[in-house]
Amino acid sequence: MNLPQDERNDEQALGASLLSLIGRTLIAISIPIIAFYVLYQGFIFLRDSKAPAGIIAIVAIIWGVGGVGILFWVFNNLVELLPDLWRGRLLPFVFVGPAIAIMSWYLTIPTLRTFWISLFGRNGPEDGLNFIQLLGSDNFVGLSNYAAVFTDSLMREAFRNNLMWIAFGSTLSVAFGLIIAVLADRSKFEKTAKSLIFLPMAISFVGASVIWNFIYEYRPAGQVQIGLLNAIVTSLGNQPRAWAQWVDISPWNNLFLIVIVIWLQAGFAMVLFSAALKGIPEELLEAGRIDGATELQIFFRIMIPYIQGTLISVWTTVVIFTLKIFDVVWVMTGGQFGTHVIATQFYRQSFTNRNSGYGSAIAIVLLIAVIPVMFYNLKQFREQDAF
């Protein structure tokens, strides 16, 4: 049966359109694969090459900056070739795709592997065994490592100390930051005061710990005290103390470590609160004063409610810092004298005791503890239309 000429033309046009769509789709798939392969070869060259350092540096710049630019250009042009429907769906991924790929490679895959290792004993999964053989091996312990995390006495001590870090470190960092922001905004030396208070943020946690080690330095009674705190104490007629190592007051000796993080983070909180406070309409504050409100009432009933979103976001951000705290504790005490936290226990089990399964379980527990706070923080940002 012969079809009318118009129908034959429509079928040919449809077939040509379909072939064009298939061709463009294959190109859209193949070219990114080739581009990623070229970038991968560049990574292998940088990792294994014995070429002169200057050549490696040039290749690294071209491979890093140029490679990302080429990938964006290739992806953008390929998406532009697709039909309007697919173009609208895929174009956003041109911008977020590299970030998603990097996050998956450096965060998601290692997290899944860490969880897999946490299901095994001290030496982790054995090489050369398939999945079924690994599950049947003597080294597979299932969730036993997680049970140990919540029953071991040192881990219970670490959980307790982390709660102290959250209760005192996060809360006092936010409180001091807010108070300083309010007072500094009313001072004629605002810029100088804020610069000095923010200055510790330029110091690393390790550097700050070294500084405070000198402040807490202890020498036996009768010797010259080079530590600032003990020099003051002995000048008042009291006995010197090893403050962070003061076992008699454990776990309250953790407070001497928490002071370091408050010193570091108060400036961070102050800057954010100062920006939020400057966003309060002056007419609102003046209306409160005209109505007879005291400065304390204005602070608690106008300022605090107005910047509540920023307050919560800053507090949850500092909570994440304190949940992951490691540097300060490790430099000051090494986790001794009742100062262990989750991160120091992870380090000790993984790299000192060489118990990879147990150490991986601690790392996963720490990740799980951080995730709810992080999601809550993102929710607050979304409600403030921050992104």
Image: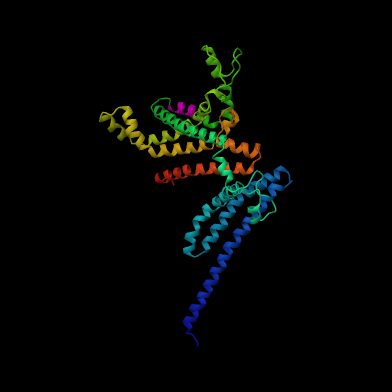
Residue 69: percent from the left, percent from the top?
A: 58, 52
Residue drawn 55% across the image and 39% down it: 151
Q: Is the residue 147 above or below the residue 230 in the image?
A: below
> Which is more toward the observer, 243 or 61?
243
| Span highlighted in magenta in the image | 190-197
Q: Residue at x 34, y 31 (%)?
A: 299
Depth check, front residue: 285 or 138 = 138
Callout count: 0
* Residue furthest to the bottom: 1
Q: Is residue 384 left or right of residue 330?
A: left
Magenta segment, principal secondary structure?
A: helix
Q: Position of residue 176 (x, y in %)?
A: 44, 29
Residue in the picture at 49% in, 61% down: 87
Q: Is residue 235 above or below residue 295?
A: above
Residue 163 in the magenta stretch? The answer is no
Displayed quadrant of residue 54 = top right
| Residue found 57% across the figure and 57% down from its top | 74
Residue 91: in sight, yes or no?
Answer: yes
Task: Say if the magenta span includes residue 195.
Answer: yes
Residue 39 appears in view: no
Q: Is residue 387 above or below residue 10?
A: above
Measuring from the top left, give residue 47's x and y in whole percent.
Answer: 69, 47
Tell me which colouring the rendered structure shows: rainbow
Q: Nearer the viewer, residue 24 or 172?
A: 172
> What x and y, as percent, mark residue 249?
52, 24
